[in-house]
Image (cartoon, grey):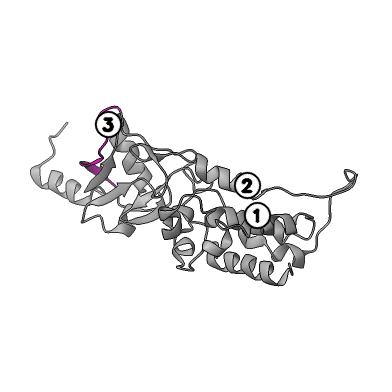
Amino acid sequence: MATPTLDKMEAAAAASPFITVTFRIRRFNPEISDESTWQDFQVEIDPKERVLDGLHKIKWDLDGTLTFRRSCAHGICGSDAMRINGKNRLACKTLIKDINPEKPITVEAIKGLTVMKDLVVDMEPFFQAYRDVMPFLVTKGNEPTRERLQSAEDRERFDDTTKCILCAACTSSCPVFWNDGQYFGPAAIVNAHRFIFDSRDEAGEQRLEILNDKDGVWRCRTTFNCTDACPRGIEVTKAIQEVKRALITRRF
């Protein structure tokens, strides 16, 4: 077999889709230190791949101690929310080429929740707020013998807020939540909205009273961080304002 010439090897290298990207990751391991540190990793990667793919390469090939959450890897489970270049995103939906790979890509845990290790945070306060707003259909009377029918118009009223995947990107982008973890946060309010405006539900008043609490919907300062951070495109700020309006008018 003929040995490839230097020219052919250089041409092949030039045609390669891979580039060298620096991932600058904020590391934290409570078993080693109480302080977090930044660590750089050099990764050869196709810019059309995702940040999640880069994290996989680091964990599988460079440092197996790197810790992060991920599950479906297709933007549905919401488990890989993190701060990428200072903005809350899903690592599985963020392409390398879209975040300027010529500079280091910074990756750190989302804010406002206690970091347990590296990119993993304690989600329990977030899910407790979600549970507190009663995110389930409440009806009275006997169990029906057939499905509860709903018009397309009635469904449209709350369709946007059914898209929430509980990734916490919106809540952990909220300055109020950063400073006071008692605030319910945008995600909990969005999920309350989904049932408050559901024509089949009968607990709207009860949810509104829950959100009328001092740590409820009135803590929102309408900064739109939550709407900007939502990977599903939910109009979070709009939903919060609609809940506020329902509290004032008692019309929903």
Q: Quadrant of the N terminus?
A: top left
Residue 228 belongs to magenta span: no
Q: Which residue is disc 2 drawn over? A: 132
> Residue shown at 45%/68% (left/top)?
223
Three-letter amino acid code at the position of disc 2: Asp
Does 242 sit above or below residue 62?
A: below
C-alpha separation, residue under disc 2 versus residue under disc 1: 8 Å
Q: Which residue is disc 1 drawn over? A: 210
Three-letter amino acid code at the position of disc 1: Ile
Q: Are marks 2 and 1 in contact (CB under 8 Å)?
A: yes
> Residue shown at 59%/57% (left/top)?
189
Query: Which numbered mark, 3 or 1, is in the foreground of this view?
Result: 1
C-alpha separation, residue under disc 3 versus residue under disc 2: 42 Å
> Residue shown at 80%/63% (left/top)?
151
Choose between 44 and 233: the one closer to the eye: 233
Q: Which residue is disc 3 drawn over? A: 61
Which residues, given as a range, are shown in magenta? Answer: 31-46
